[in-house]
Image: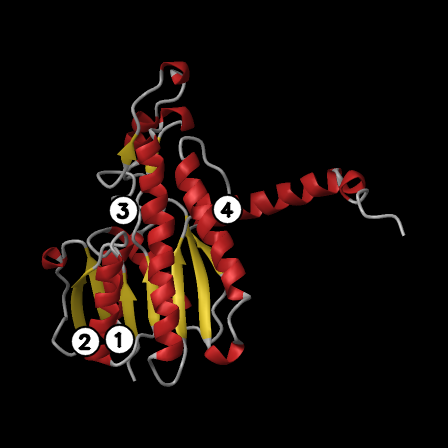
């Protein structure tokens, strides 16, 4: 039987390419966006495809999308939390509303989708089970200058997902995977990115200029990224997390090495705090 995918944020980037990959592989897909009427993919028909309005900041649209998915397909096997955006700038350049909006979309919106996905996979379909993919970032594993709030939102997703994975009963057969992309040639660093107003104290860092130079030169091919995401989705035992992209792979190994050096360096002090027996 074809798998049923539900993917958020399908108007551009990974979401758009992931939908096409699912269709090309012969599975079924629910493509969501804030303006679903603008979505267009090849090879769609009434049997294998549905589009739906979903705004991750609007719980009503999330619930309606899952209800429509069950009505049409009877189940959902893979939910991919892909919707999100990047806020660039130094921390003191961010306004409060910009910080809260970043967290609202990248973290709290993801929580709301995950909550309904869990209930659907456990309570509303037989057999139980499915996979929830959280598209985070290599920025969810390391801090990146000019992206402190974006990184905060992705680190939050990583910690939440790891904790949640240990709360689920094995018999529910619900899996979780954090997908951690490096740099890919999507619209993320272009028209999809928001920039804070400059702060005079940070005249040595210009986030907008940096990202304009980088946009379109990233090493990652988004279509290949989407293929990798699909491969994780069809695994019998998908990992809790994995990077995608050569730059992300190098970065995570470097981070792991530095973590090991740091914690070993302060091993004696770290182990000096237990209650004396």
Q: Mark 1 points at which residue?
A: 27
Q: Which of marks 1 and 2 is nearer the N terminus?
A: 1
Residue at 46% from the left image edge and 77% from the top image edge: 173
Mark 3, secondary structure of its residue: loop
Nearest-to-viewer mark from 3 and 4: 4
Q: Quadrant of the N terminus?
A: bottom left
**1 over 198 or under it: above or below:** below
Q: Do the residues labelled 4 and 1 touch (CB within 8 Å)?
A: no
Callout 1 touching callout 2 (CB < 8 Å): yes
Would you name the residue on which mark 2 appears? 48
Classify 10 Å Cα crowding around label 3: few (below 14), some (14-19), many (20 and above): many
> Could you give the CA–CA distance between mark 3 and mark 1, rounded to whole angstroms?
24 Å
Q: Judging from the image, what secondary structure is the residue with disc 1 in?
A: loop
In the displayed structure, would residue 80 be above or below residue 27?
above
Read off the residue under disc 4.
141
Q: Do the residues labelled 2 and 3 touch (CB within 8 Å)?
A: no
Q: Tag 4, which secondary structure?
A: loop
x and y percentages locating residue 201 in the rendered image: 41, 15
Name the residue that disc number 3 marks. Answer: 186
């Amino acid at each position: 039987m074809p798998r049923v995918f539900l993917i958020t944020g399908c108007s551009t980037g990974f979401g758009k390419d992931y939908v096409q990959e699912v269709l090309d592989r012969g599975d079924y897909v629910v493509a969501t966006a804030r303006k679903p009427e603008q979505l267009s993919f090849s090879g769609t028909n009434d049997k294998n495809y549905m589009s739906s309005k979903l705004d991750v900041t609007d719980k009503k649209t999330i619930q309606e999308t899952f209800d429509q998915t069950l009505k049409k397909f009877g189940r959902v096997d893979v939910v991919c939390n892909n919707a999100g955006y990047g806020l660039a700038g130094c921390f003191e350049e961010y306004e409060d509303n910009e910080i809260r909006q970043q967290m609202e979309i990248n973290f709290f919106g993801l929580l709301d989708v995950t909550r309904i996905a869990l209930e659907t996979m456990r309570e509303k379909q037989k057999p139980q089970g499915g996979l929830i993919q959280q598209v985070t970032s290599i920025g969810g594993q390391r801090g990146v200058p000019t992206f402190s709030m974006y990184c905060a939102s992705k680190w939050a997703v990583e910690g939440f997902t790891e904790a949640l994975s240990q709360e689920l009963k094995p018999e529910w057969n619900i899996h979780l995977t954090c997908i951690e992309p490096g740099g890919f040639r999507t619209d993320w660093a272009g028209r999809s990115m928001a920039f804070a107003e400059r702060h005079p104290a940070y005249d040595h860092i210009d986030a907008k200029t940096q990202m304009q130079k980088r946009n379109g030169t990233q090493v990652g091919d988004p279509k290949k990224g989407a293929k990798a995401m699909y491969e994780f989705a069809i695994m019998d035992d998908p990992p809790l997390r994995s990077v995608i992209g050569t730059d992300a792979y190098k970065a995570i190994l470097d981070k792991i090495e530095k973590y090991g050096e740091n914690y070993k360096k302060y091993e004696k002090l770290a182990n000096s705090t237990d209650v004396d027996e």
